[in-house]
Amino acid sequence: MGTKKKMGKEATYLAITIPIVALFFLFNTLPLIQGVIYSFTNFKGYGDFDWVGLRNYMDLFTDGRVGKSYWFTFRLALVSTVVTNVISLLLAMGLNSKIKFKNTLRGMYFIPNVLGSLVVGYIFSYIFTYILPAFTKLLGGEGTSILSSTSWAWVAIMIVCAWQAIAMNTIIYISGLQTVPAEVYEAGSIDGVSGWGKFKYLTFPLILPFFSINMVLCMKNFLMVFDQIMAMTKGGPAQSTESISYLIYNNGMSGGQFGFQSANAVLFFVVIVVISVMQMSFTNKREEQL
């Protein structure tokens, strides 16, 4: 009886696991392998192709448009990560305190995370294109859209990215703050710790693992920014907001550079992995020191 029951559990486990693994391989692993193969070719997305070896990878480091997209993406990701985590932590500390309607406020703050990035992008595109220019014109300004400026369009994208990401980060920080024992603050009060010192020496060291998670997730998600750019600027004006993901999609799918952009995608994947590992290593060392 025991053997039959064990075999039945194993059969159920396999029946559940095999289809999931097959789907994962079909829609994730297989396209990744195909992309790596295409990165060594001059494939245009159609027709025949030839093997070019490492030429695509070498050309990435001399292509000005690729370099410009990397610079924009890293600048956007870095600023958005800092802004998102600072605001999220402040909101979390406020919502974790004894205030009225805090559960309602938590639900309201989480709403942006429920909305689709494309939908949010189109809404903010309308705001930046029509509402804000009309408002500034009433105040005596020029009334031009920030999205039409090569110097400031990236700020609009950063605002949208941060606004949507703050929701999840705030919830994670609230979870972290709730793990801090009240006795820690009581002991700190006895030692005369208050204000900024309370946060620096008591709160932050204890929520450092949650901070690490938010930093890694933010950096990864912002480096892969795509939907907001598709909805708001489509890489413009003058390619000033062209992220790496958007460049890979735009030139790879319709620009006849499928092989070249496949190499760009492989390089970008390696960059994201390296940055994530470096972040985790740095924060882990800090946690060990504390």
Image (cartoon, grey):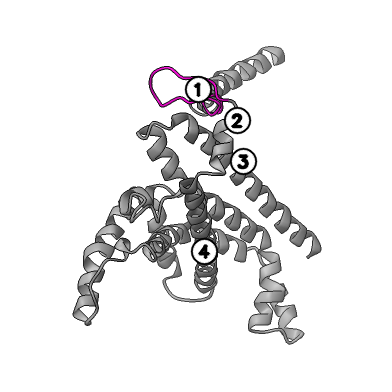
Tell which of 226 and 209 is nearer to you.
226
The secondary structure type at the circle numbered 2 is loop
Instruction: Report the predominant secondary structure element of the magenta stretch.
Output: loop
**Around disc 4, counting alpha carbons within 10 Å, would you say few (fewer than 14), some (14 to 19), or many (20 or more)?**
some
Tell which of 71 and 130 is nearer to you.
71
Numbered circle sitting on residue 26: 1
**Whether residue 178 is situated above or below residue 196 in the rendered picture:** above
Left or right of 234? Residue 65 is right
Instruction: Tell which tag, 2 or 1, sits nearer the viewer.
Output: 2
Q: Measure how far apart labels 1 and 4 are at the Cα level.
A: 36 Å
The residue that label 4 is drawn on is 79
Tell which of 242 and 82 is nearer to you.
242
The residue that label 3 is drawn on is 270
Sequence order check, earlier mark of 1 and 4? 1
- What are the residue bounds of the magenta stretch? 36-52
Q: Residue at x 28, y 58 (%)?
A: 125
Count of all numbered marks drawn on residues in the image: 4
Sequence order check, earlier mark of 3 and 2? 2
Q: Measure how far apart labels 4 and 3 are at the Cα level.
A: 21 Å
Sequence order check, earlier mark of 4 and 2? 2
Question: What is the x, y in percent for residue 205?
Answer: 71, 67
The residue that label 2 is drawn on is 54
